[in-house]
């Protein structure tokens, strides 16, 4: 299928000016009138055919990886999504699973899963999403901002192992939320409602202020720089892991933990500064701490 639609060609040049050896193709943009000058009027070989072949797919991925601004033209977005929706064949990295819609302003809603794992070199989320009913994965990329992320995600939202220092533009509501392995010092901007797990381990957190008050699943804030648990959720439905921090007390801890509680490898000495009990429906793990008095902890078992 030949491409004859000008908007897609304009999109290519809007994102990145292209120069090719021996052909000297130039793009001039003046007064918002984009013109493409090519020798013999030939289009870029990469987009001559938009059939489902790896060359076209890989080319679009390459362009998205180098995008410096979000794509808002509905025509261009549909062309990209239609081309990439079944690519690659590996189910674990498929770009789109399900159906999508694009409004007149270029906002994308997806009934299914979105996997931007393909865009490992991207510095931005190249589309503006409103809602994704399934999972949204932008992990292991170079993004520095979550601008463009969906407002609501029905499944898991994974932005782990990126270059994030802030959680601004995070979804307001998610199933699971994973922002681990970044450079976060604060959780301000985190989702307000989390129906499953909340993972923020392996960052540079000095505070838990900003995290949701209730987490239905597992909460993991281990391997950070926390000296206090103030700001932690009041209730955690699953396990709670605050190990390998710099804690001297468990003040601010959740009052109710639905599974095991791991505060190992800190510097916790006593619990006298706490005016409430912690109820743990599982094991309380406090190994590699100098603490020996924990009358405030009500657990099924204690592991030192």
Image: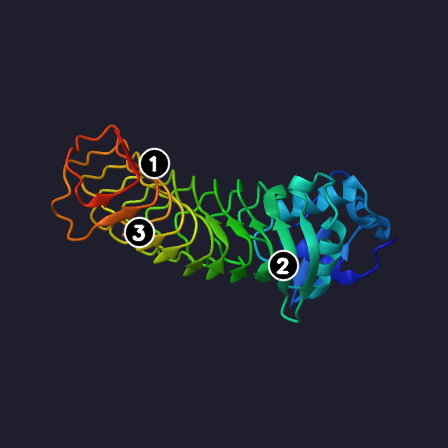
> For the point 40% across and 47% down, which residue is it?
238
> For the point 81% across and 46% down, which residue is it?
52
User: Real-space Cα distance between discs 1 and 2?
Assistant: 37 Å
**Is any part of residue 35 visible from this angle?**
no
Q: Is residue 140 above or below residue 83?
A: above
| Viewer-nearest of discs 2 and 3 | 3
The percent coordinates of residue 84 (x first, y second) are 72, 49
**Location of residue 107 (image quadrant):** bottom right
Q: Is residue 248 above or below residue 13?
A: above
The percent coordinates of residue 76 (x first, y second) are 71, 60
Name the residue at the bottom extreme.
104
Q: Is residue 116 left or right of residue 47?
A: left
User: Real-space Cα distance between discs 1 and 3?
Assistant: 22 Å
Q: Is residue 73 above or below residue 48?
A: below
**Location of residue 303 (image quadrant):** top left
Q: Residues within 10 Å of mark 3 (few under 14, many from 20)?
A: many
* Residue 55 vs residue 227, the one in the foreground: 227
Q: Earlier in the sequence, mark 1 or mark 2?
A: 2
Q: Which mark is drawn over residue 71?
A: 2
Badge 3 marks a residue whose secondary structure is: strand
List the residue tagged with mark 1: 223
Name the residue at the front extreme.
300
> For the point 23% across and 51% down, which residue is it?
252
The percent coordinates of residue 48 (x first, y second) are 83, 48
Badge 2 marks a residue whose secondary structure is: loop
List the residue tagged with mark 3: 256
**Is any part of residue 260 visible from this angle?**
yes
Split into 4 quadrants, where in the image is the C terminus?
A: top left
> For the point 34% across and 38% down, which residue is it?
222
Q: Which of marks 1 and 3 is nearer the N terminus?
A: 1
Badge 1 marks a residue whose secondary structure is: loop
């Amino acid at each position: 299928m030949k491409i004859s639609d000008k908007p897609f060609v304009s999109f290519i040049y809007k994102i990145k000016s292209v120069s090719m050896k021996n052909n000297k193709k130039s793009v001039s943009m003046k007064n918002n009138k984009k013109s493409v000058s090519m020798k013999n009027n030939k289009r870029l070989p990469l987009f001559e055919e938009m059939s489902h072949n790896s060359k076209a797919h890989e080319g679009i991925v390459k362009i998205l990886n180098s995008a410096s601004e979000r794509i808002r033209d509905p025509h261009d977005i549909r062309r990209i999504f239609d081309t990439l929706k079944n690519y690659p064949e590996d189910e674990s990295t498929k770009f789109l699973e399900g159906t999508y819609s694009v409004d007149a302003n270029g906002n994308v809603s997806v009934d299914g899963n979105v996997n931007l794992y393909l865009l490992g070199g991207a510095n931005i989320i190249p589309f503006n999403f409103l809602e994704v009913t399934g999972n949204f994965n932008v992990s292991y990329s170079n993004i520095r901002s979550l601008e463009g992320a969906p407002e609501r995600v029905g499944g898991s939202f994974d932005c782990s192992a990126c270059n994030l220092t802030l959680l601004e533009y995070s979804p307001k509501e998610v199933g699971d939320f994973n922002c681990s392995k970044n450079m976060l010092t604060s959780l301000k901007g985190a989702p307000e409602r989390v129906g499953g797990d909340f993972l923020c381990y392996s960052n540079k957190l000095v505070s838990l202020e900003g995290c949701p008050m209730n987490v239905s699943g597992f909460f993991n804030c281990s391997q950070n720089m926390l000296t206090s648990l103030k700001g932690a959720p009041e209730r955690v439905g699953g396990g709670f892991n605050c190990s390998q921090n710099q804690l001297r007390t468990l003040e601010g801890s959740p009052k109710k933990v639905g599974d095991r509680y791991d505060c190992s490898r800190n510097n916790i000495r006593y619990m006298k500064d706490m005016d409430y009990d912690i109820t743990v429906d599982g094991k309380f793990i406090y190994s590699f701490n100098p603490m020996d008095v924990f009358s405030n902890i009500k657990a099924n078992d204690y592991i030192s």
